[in-house]
Amino acid sequence: MTRAIYRYVNMTLSADPDAEAAIIEATCTTCSATSQPEIGDSPTEQREKAEKWCLEHTGQADDYGRHHTGFRATVTMFWRVTPEEELDPSQVIPTMRSDSNGDQVRGEGEA
Ligand SMILES: [Zn+2]
């Protein structure tokens, strides 16, 4: 029989401090061409560049003389969950040892 231990841990969800605030890009729904967001630009700058890219993309006719007018805007944000206490158990590395009969048995060792 397997036993489980449950506990409650308070957690906070917030923007990931190690990631970009947001990545904003536009994709043409006709040909799947995608704007190229500049990493390091603010979300406002990225949105303005994506909008400008859409207008420029529509201004260029494709090989059939058509102008693409539909776009999908994608905003990617990065979040981080911060628990108030450690969630994972300390690292336990299995080790082999000999029992009193000289047989190898599996034990546990702390990392
Ligand atoms: Zn297109």
Image (cartoon, rainbow, N blue to C red):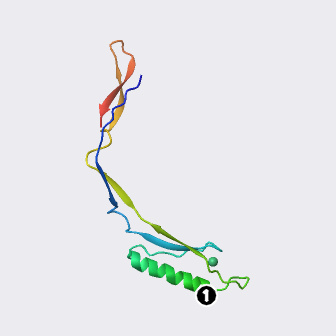
Q: Which residue does the image show at 38% across and 76% down from the upper left? A: 42
In screen coordinates, is 31 left or right of 76?
right
In percent of width and height, residue 23 lies at 44, 70
In screen coordinates, is 18 left or right of 29?
left
In percent of width and height, residue 103 lies at 39, 16
Q: Does 59 appear above or below 12?
A: below
Looking at the rendered image, the quarter that the C terminus falls into is: top left
Mark 1 C-beta to ligand 1 under 8 Å: no
Q: How many numbered circles does the render carry?
A: 1
Q: Quadrant of residue 8?
A: top left
In screen coordinates, is 76 left or right of 58?
left
Looking at the rendered image, the quarter that the N terminus falls into is: top left
In screen coordinates, is 98 left or right of 72?
left
Within-10-Å neighbours for mark 1: few <14, some 14–19, many 20+? few
Q: Nearer the viewer, residue 63 or 74?
A: 74
In percent of width and height, residue 61 lies at 67, 85
Split into quadrants, the picture shows ligand 1 in the one at: bottom right
Q: SS class of the residue under badge 1?
A: helix
Mark 1: amino acid: Gly
Q: Residue furthest top?
A: 101
Q: Residue furthest bottom?
A: 59
Q: Residue furthest right?
A: 64
Q: Which residue does the image show at 35% across and 57% down from the upper left? A: 80
Q: Which residue does the image show at 61% across and 77% down from the upper left? A: 70
Q: Does 42 appear above or below 56?
A: above
**Residue that carries the numbered disc 1 in the rendered image:** 59
In percent of width and height, residue 26 lies at 53, 74
Q: Quadrant of residue 29?
A: bottom right
Q: Quadrant of residue 90?
A: top left
Q: Does 43 appear above or below 76?
A: below
